[in-house]
Amino acid sequence: MTLTALFAAGEGDFAEYEAPLRAAFEACGLDVAVVTEAAPDQVDYIIYAPANPLQDFTPFTRCRAVLSLWAGVERIVGNPTLTQPLARMVDPSLTQGMVEYVTGHVLRYHLGLDRPATDWTPIVPPLAQDRRVGFLGLGELGRACAQALAQLGFQVAGWSRTPREVAGIACHHGDEGLRAVLERSDILVTLLPNTPATANILNADTLAMLPKGARIINPGRGSLVDDTALLAALDSGHIGGATLDVFRIEPLPPEHPYWAHPLVTVTPHIAAATRPETASQVIARNVARVEAGETLLHEVSRKAGY
Amino acid sequence: MTLTALFAAGEGDFAEYEAPLRAAFEACGLDVAVVTEAAPDQVDYIIYAPANPLQDFTPFTRCRAVLSLWAGVERIVGNPTLTQPLARMVDPSLTQGMVEYVTGHVLRYHLGLDRPATDWTPIVPPLAQDRRVGFLGLGELGRACAQALAQLGFQVAGWSRTPREVAGIACHHGDEGLRAVLERSDILVTLLPNTPATANILNADTLAMLPKGARIINPGRGSLVDDTALLAALDSGHIGGATLDVFRIEPLPPEHPYWAHPLVTVTPHIAAATRPETASQVIARNVARVEAGETLLHEVSRKAGY
């Protein structure tokens, strides 16, 4: 029997995903018609990204799961018409890309790569063992980045809402734990999901807990940062630099002060790009699991919001 | 019995090394007078760096070893008056510093950190698994850097004069092996010692073997690079960038074209700075070995020159 998968994502995405999805389903031994239009009651799975007009999931009565192409699901998880199980994208190449981005920008700050030498004045940076990196968020992405930096010798601590244990990382949680991580972070990386509890977690109060001159890397969510407070902390000299990949409004408007600020590095939401080949394999394997009566992997908790 | 260690290094070095050396000898249970002047026939060990007037080792008849503060020994190994065993500096913090420098500059090229975004045009770099890094030199430093990059997911190959095996690294040797490594290196790191066989190993012929747009990182020795050929290859567009930490003449003269070249990043010989604390521990442990009748660690082969 042929399954029907409705591809509902951004314009142009289908051109990139059509062939990898077909190949991935075939490799899993599944007969799946991947389509961009179908009668709702004939659809078995929805492959979804928010840049799509589909907002009412009610008519998809046969749909067994909605598979997000995005790791962040805040633009779909609160949809009251969505009663089907929802899976986040956990793409190994997305994690790998994030590890490379975070490691590269941490080393950029650590080694002072923004200020190339213009004369023969040796400025020797401290060793990684004397540099403290902190993570807010110890999910899939935070853990992988924290461990890569610990492997390179950095002193790494991390904070999460609920208690976590990660080998080689000093783990903290709760309000007191947040303060403990902020107070010791020369470089802070924010990799929390976008939930009501994490909105503006970097605000005037928490920025003030960081050591003077601390640098911030935010490849997580734009909502984590109170932009006005961050700009003020940069201008006062308390924060030494910020590298931002995600923003409340994307594309970041050309007139936004982040673009021109000498201490801010903007990257255009590239830290964890989903690669069609690997993402298609993740989706096909998850469909195969459900068809075999197994549980959906990476299912989103409606209560937690991620 | 008190041993006498003559400290013969650069002016000002003694202020940095005196306390760490005394502490390290004491920690090894050795009674050592560390001095900057002594009757030659009373000296048991010489702690040496080339920036010192001592050139005639003949009168040091009791000296049991010369311990270099530098990893590179080309300015002492050919000294015909040196008949005492000579040890290179193999400082774990020097290796660690080199790993951080090489990893940081490889990621800088890999992620395109020299060209920060000025608008919202997403340029997604390839993953490390699709980037080929090559090493010329698989000694202590080359191996450590190659393995750190392999750990991050890069495709790493290496070349050495004599055959070597390094876990996770495609190892090559000899003339054919040199071509094989050059032809597949998007980013090339040179970490060879300075010997007659390695002089100008990067010349017009070998630079032409690299893929178009390849980037070069040389934290090894200035003598490895034919500077005129490198500048020509940068100007022709064949080589896409060079990060150079070591030079034939240091400090690099202000008028040298490397300083102003838009594709060249100069760092002032900082890739592997010796840290007095850890270097002193290495020296004290080596002296303790010799006093206990054991072999000297990291002894230099006069024939190979390193």
Image (tube, coloured by chain):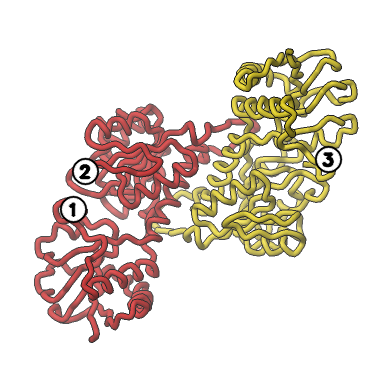
Chain colours: A yellow, B red
At horizontal 20% and vertical 48% (from top left) the residue drawn is: B195
Query: Circle 3 sits in a helix, a strand or a loop, which is it?
Result: loop
Tell me where residue A182 appears, x and y as whole percent.
68, 60
Inter-mark Cα distance, 1 to 2: 13 Å
Q: Is residue B74 left or right of residue A1?
A: left
Q: Decide: marks 1, 2 in contact (CB < 8 A)? A: no
User: Crowding at label 3, few (<14), some or many (≥20) Cα neighbours within 10 Å?
Assistant: few
User: Label 3: which residue?
Assistant: A302
Which marked residue is nearer to the observer: mark 3 or mark 1?
Answer: 3
- Chain for mark 1? B
Q: Nearer the viewer, residue B169 or A16?
A: B169
Of the residues shown, which amino acid type is indicated by label 3? Arg
At horizontal 76% and vertical 21% (from top left) the residue drawn is: A8
Q: From this viewpoint, is residue B241 visible?
A: no
Tell me where residue A110 appears, x and y as whole percent.
52, 54
User: Label 1: which residue?
Assistant: B305
Q: Nearer the viewer, residue A54 or B205?
A: A54
Q: Is residue A300 left or right of residue B151?
A: right
- Chain for mark 3? A
Is A219 drawn above or below residue B126 in the view shown?
A: below
User: Label 2: which residue?
Assistant: B199
Tell me where residue A233 appears, x and y as whole percent.
70, 56
Of the residues shown, which amino acid type is indicated by label 1? Gly
Inter-mark Cα distance, 3 to 2: 64 Å
Of the residues shown, which amino acid type is indicated by label 2? Ala
- Chain for mark 2? B
Q: Point out the image quarter for the C terminus of chain A.
A: top right
Which marked residue is nearer to the observer: mark 3 or mark 2?
Answer: 3
Q: How many marks?
A: 3
Mark found first going from the N terminus, 1 or 2: 2
